[in-house]
Image (tube, rainbow, N blue to C red):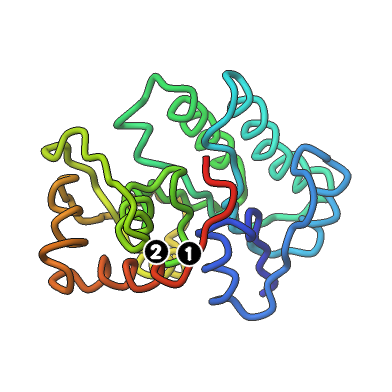
Amino acid sequence: MKVGITGWRGFIGSKLKDKIENPILFDGDLRDLSKVKLFVKECDRIYHVAGLNRDKEGKILANNIISTGNLILASKMVQKDIDLIFLSSKQIYWNANSEYGTTKQIEESIAKMACRWCIYRIPNVYGTGCKPFYNSVVATFAYQLSHNQKVTVKDSNVTREFVYVDDLINELLKPSFQNVIDVRGEVLTIGEIYGYLTNQLGQHEKLYKCMEYYKNKEIEHVS
């Protein structure tokens, strides 16, 4: 089976790429239907990981819906029945009225137009290689603490659900088709994360791995 991946340069996609033998990597703009058609022709199964989650108002919706729609349209145009594995987000519960949450809901409905589909709704993902100062409190805290930078904890009682990236990848490699899968993570408060990265360092194995990773990393162009 020939397996393709979109978004393979990103945090999750790069980890997934390393676990699949000889993956077909989409390199280009998913809004370019001609390129998507060539990609779909080569694939039997596609992991659709690519997508914006932060940008100017309206950009997330426009980019992601066209990208996901093009995968379905291309499969119909080249008459190729593909397995589509789509990475959605639990933001459709947590932030349903946000642009990102709304976009994911629409994308899910598009993904279900594939011959065989599997949708993963994932919580916050963390692990080695995640980008600090972007969408990950774990990566940001681990980087700041390992570089002796000031950490700001606005509300230590806020809870979030987190899944370690390696655990997520293991789930993605076992898709159940025609199903929406809620990926279960670990619920932690922001204060607990800070504690596991400071005075309780070593008591949470996966958070400890993050601290060790960022000790030797320099992040350029932090924003």
Q: Residue at x 11, y 66 (%)?
A: 200
Residue with the most extreme bottom position = 21
The image shows residue 31, relative to residue 84, as above or below, that is: above
Q: Is residue 1 left or right of residue 147?
A: right
| 167 or 112: nearer the viewer | 167
Q: Could you tell me the amino acid type at mark 1? A: Gly
Q: Residue at x 57, y 75 (%)?
A: 18
Q: Could you tell me the amino acid type at mark 2? A: Val
Which marked residue is nearer to the observer: mark 2 or mark 1? Answer: 1
Reading the image, the residue beneath label 2 is 165
Crowding at mark 2 (Cα within 10 Å: few <14, some 14-19, many 20+): many
SS class of the residue under badge 2? helix
Which quarter of the image is occupied by the N terminus?
Answer: bottom right
Q: Residue at x 74, y 58 (%)?
A: 26
The image shows residue 118, relative to residue 25, as above or below, that is: above
| 94 or 192: nearer the viewer | 192
Q: Position of residue 170 (x, y in %)?
A: 40, 71
Could you tell me if the residues under marks 2 and 1 are in contact, i.e. CB atoms within 8 Å? yes
Crowding at mark 1 (Cα within 10 Å: few <14, some 14-19, many 20+): some
Residue 129: assigned label: 1
Q: Quadrant of residue 34?
A: top right
Label located before the other in sequence (2 or 1) = 1
Q: Position of residue 31 (x, y in %)?
A: 77, 37
Q: Residue at x 53, y 49 (%)?
A: 86
SS class of the residue under badge 1? loop
The image shows residue 110, relative to residue 214, as above or below, that is: above
Q: Is residue 51 left or right of residue 198?
A: right
